[in-house]
Image (tube, rainbow, N blue to C red):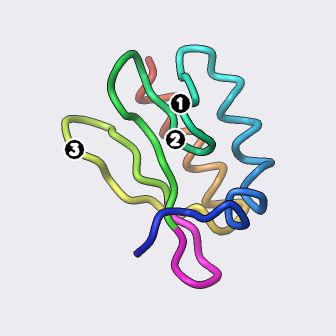
Amino acid sequence: MKHASAGALDRLEPLLKQIRKRSVLKEKSRGAFYRGSRAFLHFHEDGPRFFADIRLKEDFERLPATTAADRTALLAQIDAALK
């Protein structure tokens, strides 16, 4: 599964805007967010589907990010991880 292309990130832009509101996260490159000096979140694409790799503990977990429900759940996971 490849990292999200520029076109894929264009389609994810509404979600990226929501993530950017979390001031503790810094977007080092488009769609790649860091918490402090450590990678926290980035995106992959597989055909028409999107996935987010998010560091919830020590390792990354891959979560779906294609549908509105997926994205709502992802934002909730981000908020829970940042508490």
**Residue at 64% across / 68% down in the picture?**
66
The residues tagged by marks 1 and 2 sit, at their Cα atoms, a distance apart of: 6 Å
Numbered circle sitting on residue 59? 3
Q: Are marks 1 and 2 in contact (CB under 8 Å)?
A: yes
Q: How dense is the environment of label 2, judged by Cα within 10 Å: few (below 14), some, or many (20 and up)?
A: some
The residues tagged by marks 3 and 1 sit, at their Cα atoms, a distance apart of: 19 Å
**Disc 3 versus disc 2: nearer the observer:** 2
Q: Quadrant of the C terminus?
A: top left
**Residue at 58% across / 61% down in the picture?**
65
In the figure, 67 relative to 53: above or below? below
Task: Judge left or right: residue 73 versus residue 16.
Answer: left
The one of 5 and 24 positioned closer to us in this rendering: 5
Query: In the rendered structure, which disc, 3 or 1, sits on the residue that comes first in sequence?
Result: 1
Query: In the rendered structure, which disc, 3 or 2, sits on the residue that comes first in sequence?
Result: 2
**Residue at 68% across / 66% down in the picture?**
8
Identified by mark 1, the residue type is: Lys
Identify the element where label 2 is drawn.
strand
Q: Which residues are magenta?
A: 45-51
**Secondary structure mainly formed by the magenta segment:** strand
> For residue 41, which quarter of the picture?
top left
Identified by mark 3, the residue type is: Asp
In the figure, 67 relative to 73: above or below? below
Q: Which residue is mark 2?
A: 32
Rendering coords of residue 73 (x, y %): 57, 50
